[in-house]
Image (spheres, helix red, strand yellow):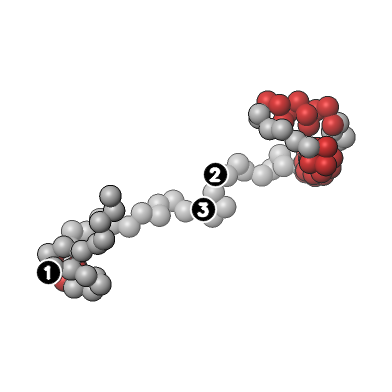
Amino acid sequence: MKITKKEVEHVADLARLSLSDDELEKMTGQLDTILSYMDTLNTLDTSQVQPTTHVFSVSNAFREDIVQESLSQTDAVKNGPLQDGQFFQVPKVI
């Protein structure tokens, strides 16, 4: 498939992109390569291939939700660089 500069300009206009002449040349070549590859893929017989949504067949990737004891407030802040025993102390932002 051969894509023309005019078609690339049209797509760039729809995407609100302004391309220089060098960028237009480069983009035309790149899009032509991509579309040629798609033509190659379209020649393959995929009638016996089942459609998939994921590369790996994972039926349920979720872990069981188990209620556990959480850290105490003092344990949670004890590794912070600055704390007052209950909260992290950080520099004033505003």
**How far is mark 3 from mark 1, CA to CA?**
48 Å
Q: Quadrant of residue 18?
A: top right
65, above or below 14, in the image:
below
Please, what is the three-letter code of the amino acid marked with disc 3? Ser
Under tag 2, what secondary structure?
A: loop
Judging by the rendered image, the residue that carries numbered circle 3 is 57
Please report contact status of discs 3 and 1: CB closer than 8 Å, yes or no. Answer: no
Q: Image point 18% across, 58% down: which residue?
A: 67
List x then y, in percent, for residue 56. 54, 55
Please, what is the three-letter code of the amino acid marked with disc 1? Gly
How packed is label 3: few (under 14 Cα within 10 Å), some, or many (20 or more)?
few
Q: Is residue 36 visible?
A: no
List x then y, in percent, for residue 66. 22, 59
Residue 53: mark: 2
Compare marks 2 and 1 and give the one earlier in the sequence: 2
83 left or right of 45 in image:
left
How packed is label 1: few (under 14 Cα within 10 Å), some, or many (20 or more)?
some
Work out whether residue 1 or residue 20 is closer to the camera in this orientation and state it: 20
